[in-house]
Amino acid sequence: MSRPGSGAEQVVRVENGFGYGVIGADLHVFPDRGPVYLLSEYDPAAGPAGRDAGWLTAQPSRLLNARFQVVDFTGRDRERAGLAAWRDGAGPRLAATWLHGPGGQGKTRLAARFAADSAAAGWKVVTATHGSGTVRPSPGSQDLRLDGAAGLLLVVDYADRWPLSHLTWLLSNQLLHRPLPTRVLLLGRSVAPWPAVRAALEEAEAATGDLALPPLDDRGGELDVRRAMFIVARDCFAARYGLADPSVIEPPGSLHLPDFGLVLALHMAALVAVDAHTRGSRPPQDMAGLSAYLLDRERRHWTQLYENRLEGLD
């Protein structure tokens, strides 16, 4: 496969299988299971723009998927500044940080925002996806050459789910061992796997550190931050539902409760508020009620699909 203007040509021939190749990096493959991991160029166009609103709203949980980026990124200014300082700081050429926090804290979205910031600053941004049991990208080649880049940023989401041996293969990839400044951002819910990964990185003379993503409760003016995040999420969800004036949907009075220290909890509250408004119902105010509401909507969707078979619909 050739890329216009790239100056490189790679031939990927596949018979009865999946074709994937990289330019400028190693490709580690199990003989019986396919790639150990997949490397992909960061795509600044990735996001919700091209996604069908009807498909998203049929199951509201899709709107909460961080990968779809339905909600505009907001907040976390301190963490963004800290990551930028780590990226641009002096020290060893290779440095790695383990970003960790509970599920729903916003790690994936923060990493995506940092990736966009880094790409805008002239860095080559690459994402690594564990190859076993994942949905693979379209067959073809990934151009991972670093020509003209200020540095390389590699983002590894769900790093705590990778076997250590697979992460070691990734960290030995020639892509990470070029003269340019190289930063590896690994994301995980738990910090438990980090010491073993850190030991592997120290053999490569890499600088290492970890960053715990704090809940929203740990900062001043927390209620103002929560309200701002709720309003941004409400407006983004309302746009998907076709609501002209989302301001008529007020934030719940329970945002001060500890449960709403998670970014995901605020997004759930905003989504339920919008969905309930379109249905003329009153949204629940606590996390248990919000979860039950969304689960009921999921169950209704799947029940409807199941019952449609009686009408000859697939």
Image (spheres, rainbow, N blue to C red):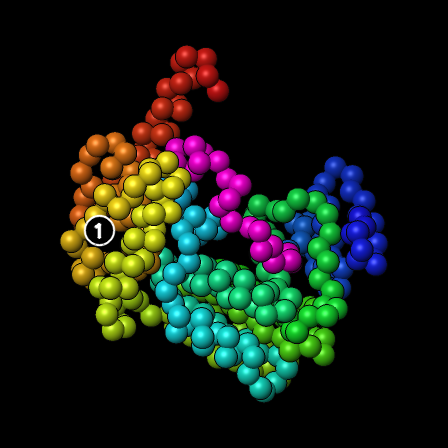
Residue for point 58% across, 86% down: 90
Q: Residues within 10 Å of mark 1 (few under 14, many from 20)?
A: some
Residue lying at the far front in this picture: please name it.
245
Residue for point 20% across, 57% down: 255
Q: Please tell me whether mark 1 sits on a helix, a strand or a loop.
A: loop
Please state which of residues 242 and 2 is positioned toward the viewer in this rendering: 242
Identity, as a three-letter code, of the amino acid under mark 1: Pro
Q: Which residue is mark 1?
A: 251
Magenta-drawn stretch contains 284 = no
Quadrant of res 106: bottom left
Residue for point 63% across, 47% down: 137
Estimate the x, y position of residue 148 in percent, counting from the top left.
73, 70
Query: In the displayed structure, does residue 266 sit left or right of residue 14?
Result: left
Segment colored magenta: 39-59
Please state which of residues 70 and 106 is positioned toward the viewer in this rendering: 70
Magenta-drawn stretch contains 42 = yes
Residue for point 51% across, 79% down: 86
Q: Is residue 21 visible?
A: yes
Q: Is residue 59 visible?
A: no
Estimate the x, y position of residue 174 in percent, counting from the top left.
72, 70
- Number of labels in the image equals 1
Estimate the x, y position of residue 224 in percent, counting from the top left.
24, 64
Residue lying at the far top in this picture: please name it.
311
Query: In the displayed structure, does residue 181 sit left or right of residue 185?
Result: right
Query: In the displayed structure, does residue 256 sit left or right of residue 243?
Result: left
Please state which of residues 163 and 2 is positioned toward the viewer in this rendering: 2
From this view, report whether residue 81 is shown above or below residue 90: above
Residue lying at the far left in this picture: please name it.
253
From this view, report whether residue 20 is shown above or below residue 79: above
Estimate the x, y position of residue 124 in percent, counting from the top left.
65, 66
